[in-house]
Amino acid sequence: MAIGKESDLLDYMGITGISSKDIFDDIVFDLLDSKLRNRYNLLVEKQLPQLLRGNMVLPVHKYLKKTKNEDIIIDDKVRKMAEYSPEDLLNKNIRKDKESYLESGFSSLEEIFNSDLPNTKKLNYLVLRAALHADDKELKSFLKTYYREFEKHIHGPTILRKMVCILDIKAYKNSA
C-alpha cells in the first residue's frame, strides 16, 4: 500500500525496477528509452546511487546527459563515477599488459578478438584497445556483435562491464 499521486508512484516503482544489467544493456543496445519515458532525472537521483553501492562501476554519462533539469541532486557516488576516465577502469592486472599491447600492433578490437592470444591476455588487450585507441563507434559496434558471448565467458562479465563503461565515457562524457 502506498499513498501519493498514482503517476509519481508508478514512475518511481518503474525506475527502481531498473537493474545494473539493464543499465549496461542500455548503453550498448539503447533499450531503456521506452521504459524511462524521459524520467532520467529520477533515474539519476534515485536509482543510480542505489546501484553504485559497494565497489561497482556503472555507466552514468548517458543519463547525466539526458537529465533535463539542472536542479537535480546528484549523489556523490554518481558524481565520483562521472569523474572516471577510461584509464581509471584499468586494474593492475590489465595495466601489466599495457606495454606488450602497445608493442603488439593490433589495429582493431576485432583483430584482437580473433587472435590466438591466451585468453587472459586477449581480454586485457581488448580493454586496453577500448580505453586507449578505440573510438565510441568501433567500441559500440564490437560490443553489439559480441555482447552475449562475453556474458557467457567466465571473466567476460567483468571485462564487458569495463568496456561498456569506457563506451559510456567516450560516447557521452564530453557532451554530458
Image (cartoon, rainbow, N blue to C red):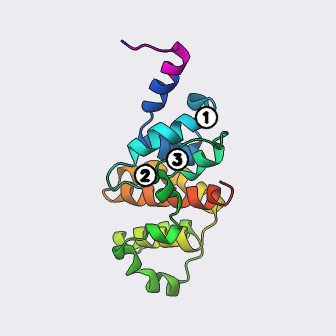
Q: Nearer the viewer, residue 117 or 33?
A: 33
Q: Is residue 101 above or below residue 74?
A: below
- Marked residue nearer the N-terminal end (3 or 2): 3
Q: Would you name the residue on which mark 1 appears?
A: 33
Q: Residues within 10 Å of mark 1 (few under 14, many from 20)?
A: few
Pointers 1 and 3 in contact (C-beta within 8 Å): no
Q: At 45% from the left edge and 81% from the top edge, which residue is drawn?
A: 98
- Expressed as whole percent of the image width and height from the top left, the position of residue 140 reads 59, 55
Distance from the alpha carbon under mark 3 to that under mark 2: 34 Å
Label annotation for residue 149: 2
**Which residue is pictured at 45% across the width and 60% down the height?**
162
Q: Element at badge 2?
A: helix
Decide which of 110, 70 is in the foreground and name it: 70
Q: CA distance from mark 1 to mark 3?
A: 20 Å
Q: Quadrant of residue 34?
A: top right
Question: Viewer-nearest of labels 1 and 2?
Answer: 1
Residue 122 left/right relative to 173 = left
Inspect the image, locate mark 1, and give the three-letter code of the amino acid beneath it. Asp
Residue 130, position in %: x, y?
A: 54, 67
Q: Which callout, 1 or 3, points at the residue further toward the start of the chain?
A: 1
Quadrant of the drawing holding the N terminus: top left
Are the residues at dot 1 and dot 2 in contact (C-beta closer than 8 Å)? no
Q: What residue is drawn where x is 53% and y is 50%?
A: 60
Q: Secondary structure at mark 3?
A: loop
Q: Nearer the viewer, residue 60 or 156?
A: 60
Q: Is residue 55 visible?
A: yes
Left or right of 120 in this view: 110: right
Q: Amino acid at mark 2?
A: Glu
Q: Which residues are magenta?
A: 2-10
Please name the residue that numbered disc 3 is placed on: 74
Within 10 Å of the Cα at label 2, are there few (<14), some (14-19), or many (20+) other Cα atoms? few
Q: Residue, x 50% and y 64% (percent of image)?
A: 84
